[in-house]
Each structure stands twice: as C-alpha cells, then as structure tokens.
Amino acid sequence: MVTKTIAAGSFKARCLRLMDEVQATRVPLVITKKGRPVAKLVPADSPPKDIFGCMRDQVEIVGDIMAPTSSLDDWDALR
C-alpha cells in the first residue's frame, strides 16, 4: 500500500486540500513531527448499504399484495 508523508507544519498550512486529496485518491497520509510519525490521515469508510430499499427499481409488484391468493382452507399446515 502506498502511503505519503508530510511534516506537521506543511499539513497545517494545507489541511483542507490534503483531506480532499486523501478522499479522492484513497491514499493514506502520515503526518510527522521532527521526522517521527504522529498521526495518520486515512479515507473514511463508505457507509454500509441499507437493506431497506435495496431492491428499489428492480422489482415490480403486480396485483394486490394485501389480498390472499388462496383461502385459508387450502393450507395444509393450518389443519
């Protein structure tokens, strides 16, 4: 994995631009003081996909979904 390094003073001067760069390139950035690593800026994880609505625009409902398709007498499990 590629990692870039930057001095803390330079990071402070260009912080917002560097955050945008890390987000766009997904390359972590190590921030150093006197040559020693003190912090690491990494891209945030994408939020997990929500299960609700995940099939939107992929499924078509045809007919009345509330009305039973057969009577309860037709079900063997209920006897």
Image (cartoon, rainbow, N blue to C red):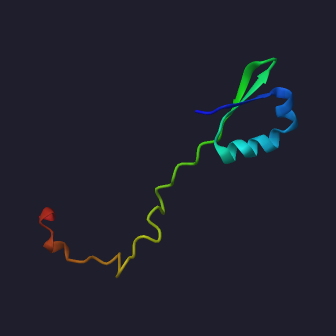
Asked if residue 37 lies left or right of residue 66, the reply is right
Residue 10, quarter of picture: top right
Residue 23, position as x, y percentages in the image: 68, 45
Residue 67, position as x, y percentages in the image: 31, 78
* Residue found at x 53% / y 49%: 48
Residue 3 lies, with reference to residue 64, above or below; the image says: above
* Residue found at x 77% / y 23%: 32
Residue 59, position as x, y percentages in the image: 40, 71
Residue 42, quarter of picture: top right
Front residue of this view, candidates 61 and 68: 61
Front residue of this view, candidates 53 and 58: 58
Front residue of this view, candidates 24 and 69: 24
* Residue found at x 20% / y 76%: 71
Front residue of this view, candidates 37 and 53: 37
Asked if residue 53 lies left or right of residue 19, the reply is left
Q: Quadrant of the N terminus?
A: top right
* Residue found at x 38% / y 76%: 61
Asked if residue 17 lies left or right of residue 47, the reply is right
Q: How many marks?
A: 0
> Furthest residue to the bottom?
63
Asked if residue 76 lies left or right of residue 23, the reply is left
Q: Quadrant of the C terminus?
A: bottom left
Residue 41, position as x, y percentages in the image: 70, 34
